[in-house]
């Protein structure tokens, strides 16, 4: 059974109905206070693993701006209690085996809708063929021909029951009437749901930061909380750990064999250690250990008497043990989640996992570990819905999984009393505010940065204008029989020379890869880059030592590119007399002239504009490229190509 879609309304910041489709892994992104947590909570209460968590409360949950109007409408009979959550599930072949064996063809459409609201009753909707149910009941009843003939026109179970009353003295008819009593009492749909479908409906397991273990607990206090139905959120993962050890609380506090108890707890710890270390790449030298001992006077409050359970994390490299509760919050979160999830998974019940901001305490690489864990679990049939603001939790390879959550009332300039704006869910980023998709932008940027470096031969330049000039001049030289830039070079703009050190760190130093830098001046980053013999500067190849790729051209040629690019903005073409004396570089001189002419900022010089014009009209302009410029570029290309051999 797979969750296909969700519709929510009348819950906290969710006012109007909002809905979205669900995939195997569904990622909810959006700003703080957009409603991501409200979506997960409303879905969790539909069918939670902890039954006590399944109730909606008007005082706590109904949108405050509407609640009094709602109370009045319900009290006056103007409306029924609101439905909060509607979830549509697809029924798979395995879900229908039993019901099809008893009533072949009864399910007219293999979909189940479950809904729940402030009446706190779970409603199931199935499209069933009641005539087939009646037909199946009659075939199994072994009724006499005369009785059967009088019943064949019955189309509903209720009609069948009324007709059977006339033949109640016959044994077979009486048994049939008795057997359909449960159907008459519950209604056909509810009977079919409870008998055949309900055991296969997934339970929702919700996990957020409040479920993290504290790392220690007083067993007697835990027993009392469980007996009173007052368990803390942090108790559930610990109870999961105890269950994994196949222990019960009474055995821990009053063991018949302490050795057997300790062995079981150690076995559970080892199981969790293996599971955790499979996905926890932050530190592979950790082991989980648990200690059970009587309370002492100096122990924390509430643990001075009775029996206490203490969790420790042992570092095998440092030979030191630390209390579980004092480890990093990311580690405690991951371990607590794994303990509870492992326990629920062992029960062999179908689950749908709801994770609220799992990235909150996790480093970027730990978030990647978590995504890997979710992918592995989904391959085994688990579905996951999680919320995040972190770009590392957005898989750029699967943007179809992303749902954008936005509270439209906060995006409006003013919320009117009659407005029904509230939390909505979108799949199209163009329909949302820019702030709502920052995580997506970050994920794409991270993906792009990772994809920059697989190329074995990388030439890192300052900007996109460098790339255009290098490619265009190289093509012109090759076309005229000269030597161009080796096509094995992949040119990567860095966004400025000051980013070169960062790019060098990100790219790493691999023997199988060649990497060179082409900057304005070598002195800009002297000593900060590896392999200084692969750091090149335009000042080495330019006529007067100026620092820019534009200075490899003659001034008149470059000014022609500028004049063509800014023909609509300039009142008259630029010439050498506008540039002043030597020094700087020609691009910086042109920028200063344009900035002086347009002090209101209406026109700004962009080095990319002349480069783009040259790239678009290279063949037209190749005749104007001087022999001196060609020689400068050929010397540069020869130096770069020599690295590749």
Image (cartoon, rainbow, N blue to C red):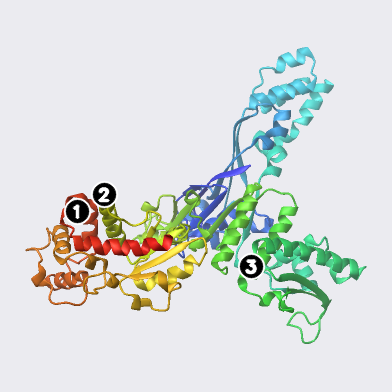
Residue of label 1:
622
Q: Nearer the viewer, mark 2 or mark 1?
A: 2
- Between disc 1 and disc 3, whose residue precedes? 3
x 69%, y 17%: residue: 152
Q: In the structure shown, which secondary structural element does the residue marked by tag 1 occupy?
A: helix
x 20%, y 77%: residue: 583
> Neighbour class for label 3 at 10 Å: few (<14), some, many (≥20)?
many
Quadrant of image for the C terminus: bottom left
Q: Report the Cα–Cα distance between label 2 and label 3.
A: 62 Å
| Rendered location of residue 332, percent (x, y) | 65, 70
| Rendered location of residue 159, percent (x, y) | 67, 24
| Rendered location of residue 635, percent (x, y) | 30, 64
Q: Report the Cα–Cα distance between label 1 and label 3.
A: 63 Å
x 39%, y 60%: residue: 409
Q: Are marks 2 and 1 in contact (CB under 8 Å)?
A: yes
Residue farthest to the bottom?
Answer: 298
Q: Quadrant of residue 494?
A: bottom left
- Between disc 2 and disc 3, whose residue precedes? 3
Q: Is residue 422 above or below residue 254?
A: above
Residue of label 3:
333
């Amino acid at each position: 059974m797979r969750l296909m879609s969700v519709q929510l309304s009348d819950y906290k910041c969710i006012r109007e109905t909002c809905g979205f489709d669900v995939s195997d892994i569904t990622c909810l992104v959006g700003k703080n206070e957009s409603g991501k947590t409200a979506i997960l909570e409303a879905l969790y209460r539909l069918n939670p693993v902890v039954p006590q968590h399944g109730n909606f409360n008007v005082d706590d949950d109904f949108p405050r701006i509407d609640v009094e109007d709602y109370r009045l409408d319900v009290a006056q009979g103007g409306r029924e209690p609101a439905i909060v959550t509607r979830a549509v599930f697809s029924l798979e072949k395995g879900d229908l085996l039993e019901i099809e064996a008893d009533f072949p063809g009864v399910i007219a459409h293999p979909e189940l809708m479950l809904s729940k609201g402030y009446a706190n009753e779970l409603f199931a909707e199935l499209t069933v063929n009641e005539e087939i149910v009646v037909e199946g009941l009659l075939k199994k009843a072994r009724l006499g021909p005369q009785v059967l003939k009088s019943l064949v026109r019955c189309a509903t179970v209720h009609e069948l029951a009324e007709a059977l009353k006339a033949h109640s003295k016959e044994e077979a008819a009486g048994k049939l009437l008795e057997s359909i009593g449960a159907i008459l009492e519950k209604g056909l749909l509810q009977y079919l749901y409870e008998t055949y479908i309900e055991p296969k409906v997934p339970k929702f397991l919700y996990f957020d930061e409040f479920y993290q273990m504290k790392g220690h607990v007083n067993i007697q206090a835990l027993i009392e909380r469980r007996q009173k139905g007052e368990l803390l959120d942090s108790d559930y993962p610990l109870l999961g750990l105890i269950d994994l050890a196949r222990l019960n609380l009474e055995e821990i506090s009053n063991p018949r064999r302490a050795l057997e108890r300790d062995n079981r707890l150690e076995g559970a710890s080892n199981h969790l250690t293996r599971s955790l270390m499979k996905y926890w790449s932050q530190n592979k030298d950790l082991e989980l250990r648990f200690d059970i001992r009587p309370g002492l006077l100096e122990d924390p409050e509430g643990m001075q008497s009775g029996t206490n359970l203490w969790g420790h994390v042992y570092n095998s490299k440092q030979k030191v043990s630390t209390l579980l509760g004092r480890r990093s919050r990311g580690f405690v979160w991951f371990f607590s989640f794994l303990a509870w999830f492992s326990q629920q998974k062992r029960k062999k019940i179908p689950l749908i996992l709801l994770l609220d901001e799992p990235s909150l305490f996790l480093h970027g690489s730990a978030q990647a570990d978590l995504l890997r864990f979710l992918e592995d679990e989904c391959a085994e049939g688990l579905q996951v819905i999680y919320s995040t603001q972190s770009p590392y939790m957005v898989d750029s390879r699967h943007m179809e999984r992303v749902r954008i959550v936005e509270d439209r009332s906060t995006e409006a300039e003013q919320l009117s009393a009659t407005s029904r704006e509230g939390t909505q869910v979108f799949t199209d980023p163009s329909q949302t505010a820019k702030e709502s998709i920052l995580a997506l932008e970050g994920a794409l940027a991270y993906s792009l940065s990772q994809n920059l470096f697989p190329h074995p031969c990388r030439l890192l330049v300052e900007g996109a204008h460098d790339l255009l000039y290098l490619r265009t001049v190289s093509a012109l030289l090759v076309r005229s029989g000269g030597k161009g830039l080796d096509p094995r070079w992949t040119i990567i703009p860095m966004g400025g020379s000051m980013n070169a050190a960062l790019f060098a760190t990100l790219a790493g130093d691999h023997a199988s890869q060649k990497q060179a830098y082409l900057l304005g001046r070598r002195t800009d980053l002297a000593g900060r880059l590896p392999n200084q013999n692969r750091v090149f500067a335009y000042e080495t190849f330019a006529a007067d030592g100026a620092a820019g790729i534009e200075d490899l051209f003659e001034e008149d040629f470059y000014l022609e590119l500028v004049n063509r690019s800014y023909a609509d903005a300039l009142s008259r073409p630029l010439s050498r007399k506008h540039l002043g004396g030597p020094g700087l570089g020609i691009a910086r001189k042109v920028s200063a002239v344009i900035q002086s002419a347009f002090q209101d900022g209406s026109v700004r010089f962009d080095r990319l504009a002349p480069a783009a014009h040259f790239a678009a009209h290279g063949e037209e302009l190749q005749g104007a490229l001087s022999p001196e410029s060609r020689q400068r570029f050929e010397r540069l290309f020869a130096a770069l190509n020599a690295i590749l051999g």
